[in-house]
Image (cartoon, rainbow, N blue to C red):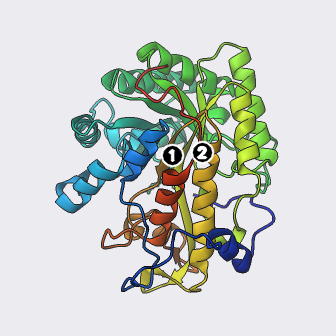
Amino acid sequence: MSLRRTLVLGAVGVVGACSLLMGPTSAFADPGGSSSGAPVGTHTDSLRDLGANVGLRVGTAVNPTELSSSTYSSLIANQFSVVTPENEMKWQVVEPTQGQYNWGPADKLVAFAQAHHELVRGHTLLWQNQLPTWLTDGVDNGTISNDQLRALLKKHIQDEVSHFRGKIWQWDVVNEAFTNPWDPEWNGAPAPGHFWVDHLGAGILADAFRWAHEADPQALLFYNDYAIEDVNAKSTAVLNWAEQLRAEGVPIDGVGFQTHLDTQYGVPTDFTQDMQRFAAAGLKVAITEADVRTFTEPSSVNTPTDPNAVAVQNAAWKQSIDTCLAVRSCISFTAWGVSDDQSWVPSTFSSPQEGAALLYDSNLNPKPEYFVVQHELATTNAAHRTGVGAGRS
Ligand code: 9MR
C-alpha cells in the first residue's frame, strides 16, 4: 500500500494550534493534573450520548476478536453508536477459499451492535486491497477471465449485501478507486492503475452500486476515500464523479471522508467548505476513518517525539468533528480504531515511527484528543441531522 498522506495545505504551527485549542475560555484546564499531564475534560457524557443530542452517530472501527475483553466491549458499547468492522467484511476475510464464506467475525460484531443499539457501517465491497489470493492468483495466471471476474464481483457484492440485508446502515460500496494527484498516473479519474477499473472499465464502479442496491434497497450506499479533506484536485474529481453518477441515476447516497491526518501536514484548512460542496450536491457525507498520527518514540506508540505535537493533534481532531457538526448532511463521525497500539498506523508508518493516532492510549484510557471531541460535541449548537436512523431516510 502506498503511504497515506493528506493534501493539507497551509499547516498551522504549534503555537497557532495551541492558541486555537487552548484559548482563554478553554474547557481543557487540568483541574488537579492527571498523572500523564493530560488535560482532563469537564464533561462526563459519552460521545454517543452527546452525538445523539444533534442526531449525529459517533463511531469507531472495531476488531471483533477484541470484544472478548470486557474493558474493550464496555467501551465500545458505552461510547459509540455506530461501528465498522476494521477488516472483517473485506473479501479476503469473508471468502478466503472460493465458495466458502466466513461470516462469523462480522456476524459477531453485527450482533454486538444490535444488542447495544448501535448501527453498522459495512466496509467494504469493491476495493483493490485485501482481495483473496484465489482471486488475484486466478487473474494473474489467466484462469479467471475478465468476464468471469465481473461475474465473481457481482456474486461477491450480492451475496455479502444479502447476507447482512437489513442490518447495515451505510455500506462503503467502493473504496479508494481514485489515484492521487501526487501519483505519476493521476488523471483525475478512477483509472489507470486501479485493479477493478483496469480489468473491467470505469463503469464497474457504477455497477457495484447498482448490485448493492438490488441486494438491500434500504442501505445507504457510500463511496469512501482519503486525501479529500480539503478543496483539492482529488476531492473535486471525486465530487464531479459522484455528481455524474447521480445524474445517471446510479444509487450512490453519500461520500465518506476517511480523514487520516498527520501532524506533519498540519490541519485541513478548508475541510468544512469542502464537505459543504458535497452536501450541496445532495450527497450525504460522513467522516469514516478518523485518526491523527504523529512521530512517536519507537518504543512507545503512545508517546509523541515532540511533546508539542499533541496540540496539533488536538487541533486536527477539533477541525474534523467541527466540520462534521457544521455540515448537517454529515450523519456519522467514526474513528479508525480505539487505542493507539491497535491502530494500523504504527505498522504502516514505522520508519520513521508514527503513532499516537487515536482517542485512547494502550490502556484504553481517554487521551486529550478524546476530551477535545467530547467538548466539541457537548458545546455545539449544530443543527439536528436527519437520516441517522437505519434505512434511506
Ligand atoms: O486498518 C486496516 C488494517 O488493519 C489493514 O491491515 C489494512 C489493510 O490494507 O486496512 C486498514 O484499513 C484501511 C481501510 O480498510 C481503508 N482505508 C485505509 C485504512 C488504513 O489502511
**In this picture, is 144 found above or below 57?**
above
- Where residue 391 appears, x then y in whole percent? 43, 21
- Where residue 102 appears, x then y in whole percent? 26, 37
Q: Nearer the viewer, residue 141 or 211?
A: 211
Secondary element type, mark 2: helix
Residue at x-position 68% and y-position 24%: 282
Question: Can residue 143 be spotted in the picture?
Answer: no
Identity of the amino acid at label 2? Cys
Residue at x-position 57% and y-position 26%: 146
For marks 2 and 1, give the CA distance: 7 Å
On the image, numbered disc 2 is attached to which residue? 324
Residue at x-position 37% and y-position 27%: 160
Taking the image as shown, residue 388 lies to the left or right of residue 119, namely right
Q: Please tell me in which quadrant of the rendered image residue 311 appears.
A: bottom right
Question: Can residue 355 be spotted in the picture?
Answer: yes
Contact check, label 2 and label 1, Cβ < 8 Å: yes
Identity of the amino acid at label 1? Phe
On the image, numbered disc 1 is attached to which residue? 333
Q: Nearer the viewer, residue 358 or 188?
A: 358
